[in-house]
Amino acid sequence: MIDTRNPDPNSFTPSRELSDFLESGQLLRLFEYWCSKRNGRLMPGRRDVDPLEIPWALSKIFLIDFEPPDVFRYRLAGQEVSDVFGRNLKGCTLEDILSPDAHVRVTERWMNLVETKSIIAMKGLVYLPADRIPMGERLLLPLAEEPDGPVTGLLGMTECEWVNGPMTGEHKMSDIEIYPASEV
């Protein structure tokens, strides 16, 4: 876990708000990796992200290509992400893997990231439940091929625990926080 009280001066420290919101040390570590790839830019590009540099995250990360006007296509999805959907997600769009209602909701959320060049952090119900309830956290980080240019993709990671049984009032929908990349 990243210690924000006594950070290494050679290492980026996540914004106070993000580190207060997220509890997962692995998500904060991914955020730190993303920041290290910015090289003075608002967002890193897809070419800057090398999954082999983050082996601790491989099973839980996903890389998404954004295709205007509103298509999100999986370039890479770790084994834990693919297992949720029961198949390899490479090349799949949100429309391919989600119900029509879920597709609309997720596309709207991810378009917010694209349009505002923001980071999205979620806590609570992280996948639509079936026979198990997925409680955890998710981090979505924008990518851009041109310095400070339009968002062309995203890097994401989900940390969750699966709870057996029916959904109850205790299992609320995710709390969502949005952090403009320009402010972190």
Image (spheres, rainbow, N blue to C red):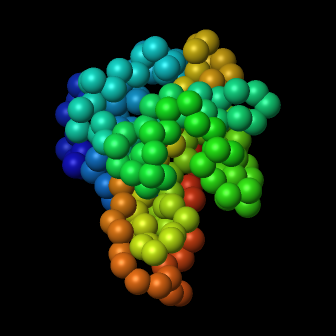
Q: Identify the residue shown where x is 33% and y is 66%.
A: 161
Q: Nearer the viewer, residue 87 or 154?
A: 87
Q: Is residue 4 visible?
A: no
- Residue shown at the point (47%, 67%) measured from the top left: 124
Quadrant in the rendering for residue 28: top left
Q: Position of residue 108 (x, y in %)?
A: 72, 49
Quarter of the view holding residue 111: top right
In the image, residue 44 above or below residue 88 = above
Relative to 89, say whether 41 is above or below: above
Q: Position of residue 182 (x, y in %)?
A: 58, 32
Figure check: 58 above or below 25: above
Q: Position of residue 89 (x, y in %)?
A: 50, 39
* Nearer the observer, 93 or 19: 93
> Can you name the residue that lies furthest to the front here?
87
Residue 43 in view of the camera: yes
Q: How many marks?
A: 0
The image position of residue 142, as x and y in percent, is 55, 32
Residue found at x 58% / y 36%? 92
Q: Is residue 128 left or right of residue 133?
A: right
Q: Is residue 80 left or right of residue 149?
A: left
Residue drawn 45% across the image and 39% down it:
88
